[in-house]
Image: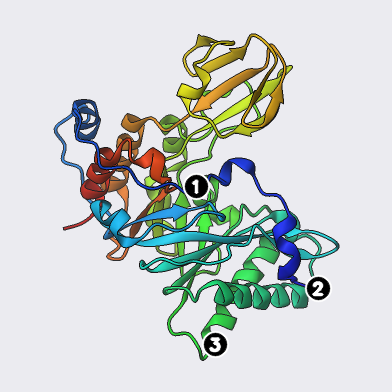
């Protein structure tokens, strides 16, 4: 089972994740009354801080990392950086979309996305070899700052393999004389929290609860597949939050995308802002819904007349509702982090004050 780095750069990864890097714009100073209203909510109950540290995910493997000066206004102290993905390719697990370097003056936590296909039908010794190869490649890019995170939406059929991968990586890291005190963390989906007694708890030092990507991307009738508080709330049972066996960090969304549908079927993810869709040749029959009036090429994708596009973003007021709920129901955890997915300098510059306020409200004094 080879883990050949030389072949990795030729593989494709999701197009929308490959935004080019941007230089942050100055912080805006405009009127934030709407954001303030969302922050205050419908009652006078004080928001309870629940995290000691703020972080960003950085998911664009071809873009340079931000530096401390870029993130200083947000109080961010470390970055969770996507290093590479592991997929099944040529009869074995392979790394793809490999980050060439991780140069930042901030502490960097590597994140490795593991597809479920990469884990199918692997023997225990193959999983252990995979864990060793992952660790070697992680160290080659940049030695982690105290933690390595695996991201995998494991299923009943891949749970055993994924949990063995986590346990093997944990053991390898602990035995490595070149590093000191590196924890292994795992992402946790909402259903894996609510039903943790059925889905199992990963053998990790900590988890990162993903409170996003909860809807059906490919369903043309979906309202918002990124984040809906009513749907998230149905999974965030206070009992599960209190009883989950490992420490949990909280990951919230701060991204958008445009989803195209042709003849009622999902077609592609487009790297477009809502403003890009308000142009001649595109009509808007409803809020965040668009329809092409003629054949067009958008974000390099050829789309026929009649193709429909759903623009999705994160509703700020709903995110504040989630924050108020978490502050009220999360158990005390002195080292909890809040992580926003994901950092994009160009987009964040438009709403810097909102995110500064969000982080400030969440962090414990």
Where in the figure is residue 345, as x and y percent of width and height?
39, 45
Q: Is residue 72 left or right of residue 19?
A: left
Q: Is residue 83 above or below residue 45?
A: below
- Say which of marks 1 and 2 sits in front: 2
Looking at the image, which residue sits at the far bottom?
177
Where in the figure is residue 44, as x and y percent of width and height?
14, 32
Q: Nearer the viewer, residue 140 or 212?
A: 140
Q: CA distance from mark 3 to mark 1?
A: 35 Å
Q: Are marks 1 and 2 in contact (CB under 8 Å)?
A: no
Q: Specify which label sits upstream in the sequence, 3 or 1.
A: 3
Q: Is residue 185 left or right of residue 332?
A: right
Q: Is residue 156 above or below residue 211?
A: below
Q: Is residue 91 above or below residue 115?
A: below
Applied colour scheme: rainbow
Q: Residue at x 31, y 61 (%)?
A: 68
Q: Specify which label sits upstream in the sequence, 1 or 2.
A: 2
**Mark 2 — residue?**
1
User: Residue 176, labelled with which disc?
Assistant: 3
Q: Residue at x 47, y 54 (%)?
A: 58
Q: Quadrant of residue 46?
A: top left
Q: CA distance from mark 3 to mark 2?
A: 22 Å
User: Residue 194, labelled with which disc?
Assistant: 1
Where in the figure is residue 357, as x and y percent of width and height?
22, 43
Q: Nearer the viewer, residue 348 or 37?
A: 348
Q: Is residue 75 left or right of residue 296?
A: left
Residues packed near mark 3 inside 10 Å, few (<14), some (14 to 19) or many (20 plus):
few
């Amino acid at each position: 089972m080879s883990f050949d780095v030389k072949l990795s750069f030729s593989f494709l990864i999701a197009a929308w994740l490959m935004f080019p890097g941007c230089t942050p714009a100055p912080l805006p100073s405009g009127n934030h009354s709407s954001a303030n209203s969302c922050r205050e909510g419908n009652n006078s109950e004080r928001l309870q801080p629940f995290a000691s540290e703020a972080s960003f995910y950085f998911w664009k493997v071809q873009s340079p990392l931000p530096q401390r000066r870029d993130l200083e206004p947000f109080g961010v102290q470390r970055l969770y950086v996507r290093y590479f993905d592991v997929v099944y390719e040529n009869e074995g697990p392979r790394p793809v979309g490999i980050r060439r370097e991780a140069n930042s003056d901030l502490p960097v936590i590597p994140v490795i996305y593991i597809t479920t296909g990469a884990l199918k039908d692997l023997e225990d010794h193959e999983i252990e070899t995979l864990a060793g190869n992952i660790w070697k490649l992680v160290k080659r890019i940049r030695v982690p700052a105290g933690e390595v995170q695996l991201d995998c939406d494991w299923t009943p059929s891949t749970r055993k393999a994924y949990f063995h991968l986590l346990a093997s990586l944990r053991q390898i890291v602990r035995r490595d004389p070149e590093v000191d005190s590196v924890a292994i963390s795992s992402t946790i989906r909402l259903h894996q929290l609510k039903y943790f007694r059925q889905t199992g708890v990963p053998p990790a030092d900590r988890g990162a609860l993903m409170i996003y990507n909860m809807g059906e991307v490919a369903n043309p009738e979906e309202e918002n597949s990124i984040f809906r508080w009513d749907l998230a709330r149905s999974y965030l049972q206070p009992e599960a939050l209190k009883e989950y066996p490992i420490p949990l960090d909280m990951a919230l969304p701060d991204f958008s995308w445009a989803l195209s549908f042709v003849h009622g079927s999902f077609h592609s993810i487009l790297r477009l802002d809502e403003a890009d869709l308000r142009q001649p040749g595109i009509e808007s029959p409803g809020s965040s819904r668009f329809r092409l009036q003629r054949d067009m090429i958008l974000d390099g994708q050829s789309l026929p007349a009649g193709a429909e596009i759903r623009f999705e973003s994160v509703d700020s007021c709903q995110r504040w509702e989630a924050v108020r709920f978490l502050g009220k129901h999360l158990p005390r955890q002195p080292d909890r982090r809040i992580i926003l997915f994901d950092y994009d300098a160009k987009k964040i510059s438009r709403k810097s004050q909102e995110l500064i306020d969000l982080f400030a409200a969440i962090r414990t004094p």
